[in-house]
Amino acid sequence: MTTNTAPGDPVLTVKNLIKHYSLKTTLPGQRRTKVPAVDGVSFDIEAGTTMALVGESGCGKPTTAKLVLQLEQADQGEVWLSGERIEADARHSVRRLRRNAQMVFQDPYASLTPHMRVSAILREPFIVHRICSSGEIDKRVAKVLESVGLSGEIGRRFPHELSGGQRQRISIARAIAVEPALVICDEPVSALDVSIRSQIVNLLLDLQQSRGLAYLFISHDLGLVEHISDTVAVMYLGKIVETAPSRVFFANPRHPYSAALLASSPTPDPRQRGRPAALRGEISNMGELPSGCRFRLRCPMAISKCAEVEPLLRPVGEGHFAACHRSEDMAVPIPASGQASGSAPPGT
Amino acid sequence: MSPLRSANAPIAQGPILDLAQVEVRFPSARGTFAVVDRVDLSVAHGEVLGLVGESGCGKSMLARSIMGLVPPPGVTTGGTMLFNGVDMVGLSKDERRRLRGDRIAVVPQEPMTSLNPTLRIGDQLTEVLRAHRPTMSSDERRARALVVMEQVGIQFAEQRLSQYPHELSGGIRQRVMIAMALICGGVELLIADEPTTALDVTIQAQILELFMQLQSEQKMAVILITHDLAVIAQTAHRVAVMYAGNIVELAPVLDLFDVPRHPYTRGLLESMPRRGISASKTHLATISGSVPDPSNPPAGCRFFDRCQFAVKGTCDAENPALEQITEDRWVRCFRWRELPEFVLADAGAGS
């Protein structure tokens, strides 16, 4: 199996991915409402880089991951991995995808089979993908355990005998065993204790560097995202509303929703408190989207045009795209301790 | 900035809650072991006390012990718990129940699993009043429910009363839980156990803001339990750090973040990625190893195995006592005087 990508070429390219779910109806004759869970999402991830996908729950982050891995069938759109288009109905194509793209899940307590020993869990990928002869498997398992910082002795144990951090290391070992080009990490540290998180983050960074892995990193922890990502894409109700190089994004977000997310994430500094909550209301129901911009009902900057014309993702800077009519009004560097623009302090 | 949001608010009057040597034990194959190990802690009137620690450190069990709700086979085996001067350990089950939900209330982590999915919101809210205010008529209860729902910022309160929990979003459900805690109108101590952990950051910001607003309006004391130091930094007046059943550090919030004294607190603060400060894609500081097994704690300091400052012969010989080092600071470490100055990596380069 050869991959035909040159360095610098994207490992993953997603073009105009669309997935609509229809809501189950309770009454006969009631019209089915379509929910645009993922609505025209496109992005690239290059080898050795990390793209973080951020946004509130219900915005379509996990659905996007599932569509990339063909765990859900997209209604429309293309997924290209290592220069090859994935054909959802061709088994060989999907099998190659499964080897080339792996996933690390949020909850290491739920994602490891409880009745299998660690060694058996880690043997599976080698068997399924016929990577090496059966005599060689044990050696490969020991090697992959070593690369995630665990001793071979742990192979005899069951998942329940391990700590949360060890389990997440096993999940990562299982993901990298098949030497994928892309690893999708869905909140990989948010179920872990604070003192363990940084160990796992460091491990992910090391593996990326030594193996040139591309990460699609789904997270709500913006402090962590700033630390580990090269690019950031913000999703809101099924659409990417802003994407930019990480440094640019955190210095000057150009979509009001991004700015609100940044202002909402709490700072570990007791001297910077008393900021009012940046956003009123909650993410609206996908079944009943407003006209025009999907964010306008919560947006502190909305104008009449926002109700009439849906803003499309457009370039606002070097590698920086935003879907907002008023991006230009936000082109001022926001200081790290800055107030959320436009929202008045409540009840003062 | 409203005064309640200032970090070190003055603390009025004496403590509302005063714990001394509180211990919670669970049975094991080799006898019993302490999950909460002789905790001394007091909470002042109108104070927000942050209780931080990792899972299994005993913070939630301590909260349950204060509520009188330690799940069997666990038992609160020792110590005194003075609530407004009355020792709650000696109270009967009935007397405990009368306090709970009325003067001491709790806001749990998971609003989904804490609400009964088969009962309407209105019934669940007024149930508290049926128990604690039996003389109220059902119209009065309903009126009171509407008032409290408005207080916690629930719109369309009238309609919400007849809805079921699954019809509400996570943020509204958590507001309902807060309304339930406040509905009797006499809460003096509110225990919030990871109240925003299950919520999105945008909703978390709203709920924390609501908490702080209610806290100052109603002058209640709050124990805020969380693993998230950023949430603590945004809300607490004082902070207690727990590790393996012990309180290892207790300090006013600014002091704790500026000059953490315990190696564990230092480790936690160092290992957090910080917006605009930590250099991207570099290694984060770590605390090696993992939390000791509570049924078999080490003989010496419980943090010994993971501590970069530990000294053999001293630190592993016995568990250090919680030592008072200034008027309002305590630390459980033999070596706190000798530790190097606490400096966050790259802290100066961030601006």
Image: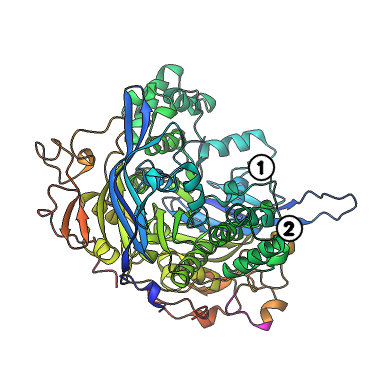
Q: Which residues are magenta?
A: A299-304
Residue B12 shows in the view = yes
Q: Is A327 positioned to the left or the right of A210 in the image?
A: right
Place of residue B167 in the rendered image (x, y in percent of width and height, measured from the top left):
69, 55
Instruction: Name the residue tied to disc 1.
Output: A87
Specify the amino acid type for callout 2. Answer: Ser
Q: Return the chain for callout 1.
A: A
Instruction: Name the residue tied to disc 2.
Output: B162
Task: Verify CB contact (< 8 Å) between mark 1 and mark 2.
Answer: no
The stretch drawn in magenta includes residue A280: no
In this rendered view, identify the residue nearer to me: B273 or B228.
B228
Secondary structure beneath label 2: loop
In this rendered view, identify the residue nearer to me: A65 or B177.
B177
Query: Separation of disc 1 and disc 2 at Cα?
Result: 49 Å
Residue A10 shows in the view = no
Q: Is A228 positioned to the left or the right of A330 in the image?
A: left
The residue depicted at 57 percent of the width and 55 percent of the height is B132
Considering the whole magenta stretch, tell me its main secondary structure.
loop
Q: Which of the 4 image quarters holds residue B190?
A: bottom left
Q: Is residue A327 above or below residue B341?
A: below
Place of residue A6 in the rendered image (x, y in percent of width and height, measured from the top left):
46, 50
Query: In the orientation shown, which residue stands out farthest toward the front?
Result: B135
Q: How is the image coloured?
A: rainbow
